[in-house]
Image (cartoon, helix red, strand yellow):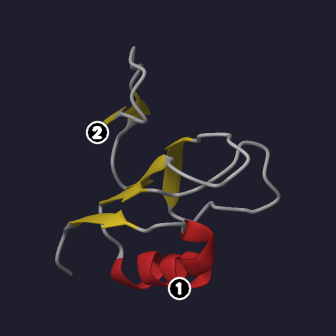
Amino acid sequence: MTKFVLQWNVGGLLAHLSEFKQYLQKSRPLIAAIQETHFRENGPYNYNVPGFTLYRKDINLPNRQGGVALYISNSLSQRQSALTTNLNAVSATV
């Protein structure tokens, strides 16, 4: 199977969540870098995907906007990296 990294400016992952989870399970990218997730902290949805670790940065505004996420395959050694920035960003060392 081809090893690859997925990058997607999704414009709201909730609207595509089931197809996204199926795609990750089938295609097994090493990393999926997602922008404009529109996740909210403490929201009722489960964004986790089996076989992947999720690192995310949410923007908790009344209207859903922004947010970023990294889905990293559990086959890779990884850890979240600390960022000191006001940017809407998340980082991990793989």
Mark 2 or mark 1, which is nearer to you?
A: 1
SS for dot 1: helix
- From the image, tell me which residue sits under label 2: 94
Mark 1 packing: few (<14 Cα in 10 Å), some, or many (20+)?
few
- The relative height of residue 83 versus residue 4 in the rendered view (above or below) is above
Residue 44 image point, x, y percent: 82, 58
The residue at the far right in this view is 44
Q: Residue at x 78, y 52 (%)?
A: 43
Say the numbered circle drawn on residue 44: none
Q: Decide which of 64, 23 is in the foreground and name it.
A: 64
SS for dot 2: loop
Is residue 74 in view? Answer: no
Q: Residue at x 38, y 18 (%)?
A: 85
**Within the image, what quadrant is residue 83 found in?**
top left
The residue at the far top in this view is 84
Give the total of numbered labels.
Answer: 2
**Within the image, what quadrant is residue 73 found in?**
bottom left
- The relative height of residue 87 versus residue 3 in the rendered view (above or below) is above
**Residue 39 placement, left or right of 4:** right
Q: Decide which of 64, 15 is in the foreground and name it.
A: 64
Q: Quadrant of the C terminus?
A: top left
Q: Residue at x 43, y 21 (%)?
A: 86
Q: Decide which of 67, 17 is in the foreground and name it.
A: 67
Amino acid type at mark 2? Val
- From the image, tell me which residue sits under label 1: 19
